Image: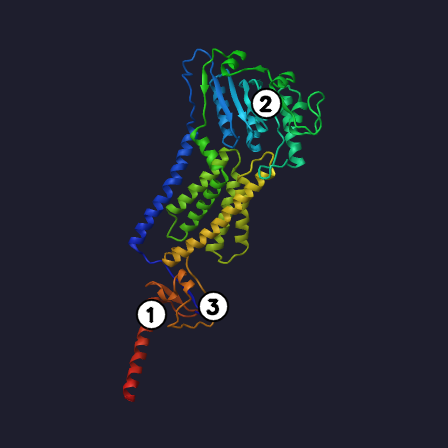
Amino acid sequence: MHGAFFSARRVPDFQWRSALARVRMMSIILPVGALITAVGAATYPTLARQDVATAETAPVYIVPISGTIDLGLAPYLSRVLDQAANDGAAAVILDVDTPGGRLDAVLQMRDALLGSDVRTIAFVDRTAFSAGALIAIAAEEIYMAPGAVIGAATPVDGATGETASEKIVSAVRTTFKATAEARDRNPLVAEAMVDPEVVIDGLDARGELLTLTTEEAIAWGYSEGIAADRAALLIATGLEGATVVETEPSLAERLVRFITEPVVSTLLISAGMLLIIADFFVEGFGLLGVAGLGALALFFGGHALAGLAGWEDVVLVLIGLALIAIEILVIPGFGVPGVLGVVALLGGLFLAMLGREIQTPEGIEQAALTAVASLIAVVIGTALVFVFFARHRRLGPLVLQATAQDSVVTAGHSTSRWLNWFGSPAQLPRGAHITLPGAPQAAASDLYDSATESSSSSRQRRRSRQEEVR
């Protein structure tokens, strides 16, 4: 149709509304339920404790630092340190056995340890490599089991396994040095754990990364003594009569570890935005939109608890969504608001996955990939959502509009097969309107009836001519 402007409005359909209501309800239960669970868990942290209130002596809290250090461990350690301070605990023991982990997470843990008023003791059971070494050095006291080792803390790119840039190495080396100085330990030893170019006579040579055995750590002031197990540790530290409190991450902290996984973050971002976009295709702002906001709230809530996302990131994403909505609903076409909206959206999501501390190339690359993958998924998903609603002619407030010049209406020509995916114009529902420039609005059903009558008259005239010929 050339030179015509038409809009197809949604026709009420009770069965469709009922089915859509059920879909909306199911789509909101999981994300909102998970959000409520996370908030509840965050306000009611779990501590697997023995009867602390009735204990005759101050309790000792045990925090296991095992496996790879991730973002969920930072809020967990901070919470336990705060809880121990409130309960008047005698000490917090870090049971360390880790190959290392995320730099942003360990920097948060280091700050929490240095800022705590509670006595902190690191017990290196087997290994305290990389990030684990920094955690141990940040504690007030270090005890090591026989055969344990500590050190080997050069930052590496997790994707390639290669040593990080000199800029990152320098920043981490300085952090180790400052931490050692804060605990009255030899800063040169801490630097040698990070930078193989640091030489300590009688301990390591140039080009060798420093790793200390238990005996070497004691000799160089990086261990207060040897403890074969926890019982021996309690005796060595004068805490043998204390009530031991075994701690574990709360549900919210475990949820943080799950949400901050790159794949899960991508799914939450994509699902949240797609649900919000899908809600534009139905009448009003309903449960689909609420479910989308719930998914985004889970994403930002998890990253906020992990110490990554801030309010500025949320505001940036909201601005991006608002600009994109203006582009779609107010000024159709892909112009300046759309471009700015996409940039703001990607920027907010990208910054929400990065901390405000030292950033590694691996972390920056992972955040960028997650943001871009989410955008691609949203674009593809939006096209599929539009196809689905257009085929079923349930476009709600989104109005199909087309304008052209020199309008000509033709009949009897079928559209291309692929166009039928978007709903054939010949199948406009009853009640749709077609508006011609400079002409009054007419119901599509009236035009259809007129076209039908004209076609019937033409057939009658042809039959009359055929009878005259005979």
Amino acid type assigned to the residue bearing label 3 in the image:
Ala
Which residue lies at the image location 32% right of the left edge and 79% below the top edge? 458
Check disc 2 and report its element: helix, strand or loop: strand
Q: Of the numbered discs in the image, which one, if any, rests on residue 448?
A: 1
Q: Quadrant of the N terminus?
A: bottom left
Look at the picture and state if 240 lies above or below 305: above
Q: Are there few (<14), some (14-19), or many (20+) residues within 10 Å of tag 3? A: few
Q: Earlier in the sequence, mark 1 or mark 3?
A: 3
Q: Which residue is mark 2?
A: 149
The location of residue 406, given as percent across then percent down, is 46, 72
Label 2 or label 3, whichever lies nearer to me, is 2
The location of residue 285, given as percent across then percent down, is 39, 48
Q: Are there few (<14), some (14-19), or many (20+) residues within 10 Å of tag 2? A: many
Amino acid type assigned to the residue bearing label 1 in the image:
Tyr
Look at the picture and state if 185 lies above or below 316: above
How far, Cα to Cα, is label 2 from label 1? 85 Å
Q: Of the numbered discs in the image, which one, if any, rests on residue 404?
A: 3
Check disc 3 and report its element: helix, strand or loop: loop
The residue sitting at the bottom extreme is 469
